[in-house]
Image (cartoon, rainbow, N blue to C red):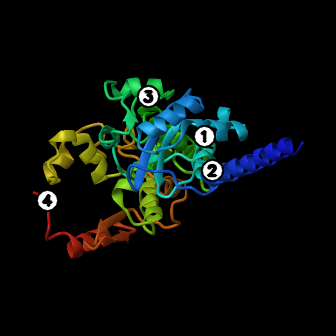
Amino acid sequence: MKTLLSVLVVAVLALAGAAVWGWWQYERRPLPMAAAEVEVEIERGGGANRVAESLNRQGLRVSPWLFRLAVRLREDDARLRAGIYLFDSPVTLRRLIDRLTRGDATQHAITFIDGWTFRQMREAIARTPELRQDSRELSDLEILQRIGATETHPEGLFAPDTYAFDRNSSELKVLRQAYRLQQRRLQQAWERAQASTPPLPYATPYEVLIMASIIEKETGRPDERPKVAAVFVNRLQRGMMLQSDPTTIYGLGDAFDGNLRRRHLQTDTVYNTYTRGGLPPTPIAMPGRAAIEAAVAPAAIDALYFVSRGDGTSEFSNDLAAHNRAVNKYQRRQGLN
């Protein structure tokens, strides 16, 4: 009996010791790492064994059997999530499993800037190696079809914003997110436009988007967007030509060398609002939320003209005589060739 009791005591002490050791390994012991920061990629469809192998292969040293045991005791085998994770030392086994089960992955991001063209968007995507290349061989129209857009011209259809994504996410997925966000913003603006008194001169939400893109390119000053919107709305309501330099420049395409000349204003294209009345056929850039809001909430002013003062602000005028005086004061010396 004494021998059996001694064996039991030793067994209990051994189990207690093992439990303490296991707890320390799980809760307190920093895992060896190949560097102070280690980025690991966990692929989809891998259980605890494959995850442990992947961690070790990528520089985060963890005992495979201890990792499997801890995951099993936590009943987390089915909750390990794929993604890119960045770990900085020290990291314990508990912290490691917590992050892998939360899906607290390291995400990348891409930013589309207010006023960019779709061409600039595609160039930014091409410079983002973390995205899976599934749009680069597609035409603009094919991209629109793949993301479920009903439009045939991509300009202005995507919301300028910052989009987070996991490594190897689809380029088309990011474009779809940007398209849907712009559609939501536009729908909200259209509801506001329909309730406006007096009525605004837009027949469709797409016309709001076109106007917003012009406002976006005409000024980057938040306080001036509603005033610029008012000038163009007032012109449309009076049947005047918009006479917007950015639309004309857009119509010139690659022929524009950065210097807008008088002959450019006289060269007819579908985007030349000096030679054609009404709105151009499509947006000319990606308007941000503020420009869209300005398009449906123009300032309550009677201005029909504006000219740059040369300091980033504009002078607004109600009639041609006042506008000509402003041009003489601020810009006549620059002239057009």
Separation of residues labelled 4 and 2 (CA atoms): 74 Å
Local crowd size for mark 3, using a 10 Å CA cut-off: few (<14), some (14–19), many (≥20): many
Q: Circle 3 — which element?
A: helix
Residue at numbered disc 3? 144
Residue at numbered disc 1? 66
Callout 4 touching callout 3 (CB < 8 Å)? no
Question: N-terminal of the two: label 4 or label 2?
Answer: 2
In this rendering, which labeled residue sits more in front, label 4 or label 3?
Answer: 3
Question: N-terminal of the two: label 1 or label 2?
Answer: 2
Separation of residues labelled 4 and 1 (CA atoms): 76 Å
| Amino acid residing under circle 2 | Tyr
Separation of residues labelled 1 and 2 (CA atoms): 8 Å
Q: Circle 2 — which element?
A: helix
Q: What residue sits 31% from the left and 52% below the top? A: 243
Question: N-terminal of the two: label 2 or label 3?
Answer: 2
Callout 4 touching callout 1 (CB < 8 Å)? no
Q: Circle 1 — which element?
A: helix
**Res. 32 visible in picture:** yes
Callout 1 touching callout 2 (CB < 8 Å)? yes
Residue at numbered disc 4? 336
Look at the picture and state if 165 lies above or below 323: above
Residue sticking out furthest to the front: 2
Q: In the visual, does 302 lie left or right of 269?
A: right
Please tell me the numbered disc located at residue 26. 2
* Residue 248 screen position, x and y as percent: 26, 46
Question: Looking at this view, is 207 or 116 the one in front?
Answer: 116
In this rendering, which labeled residue sits more in front, label 4 or label 1?
Answer: 1
* Residue 263 screen position, x and y as percent: 14, 48
In this rendering, which labeled residue sits more in front, label 2 or label 3?
Answer: 2
Separation of residues labelled 4 and 3 (CA atoms): 39 Å
Question: N-terminal of the two: label 4 or label 3?
Answer: 3
Residue sticking out furthest to the right: 1
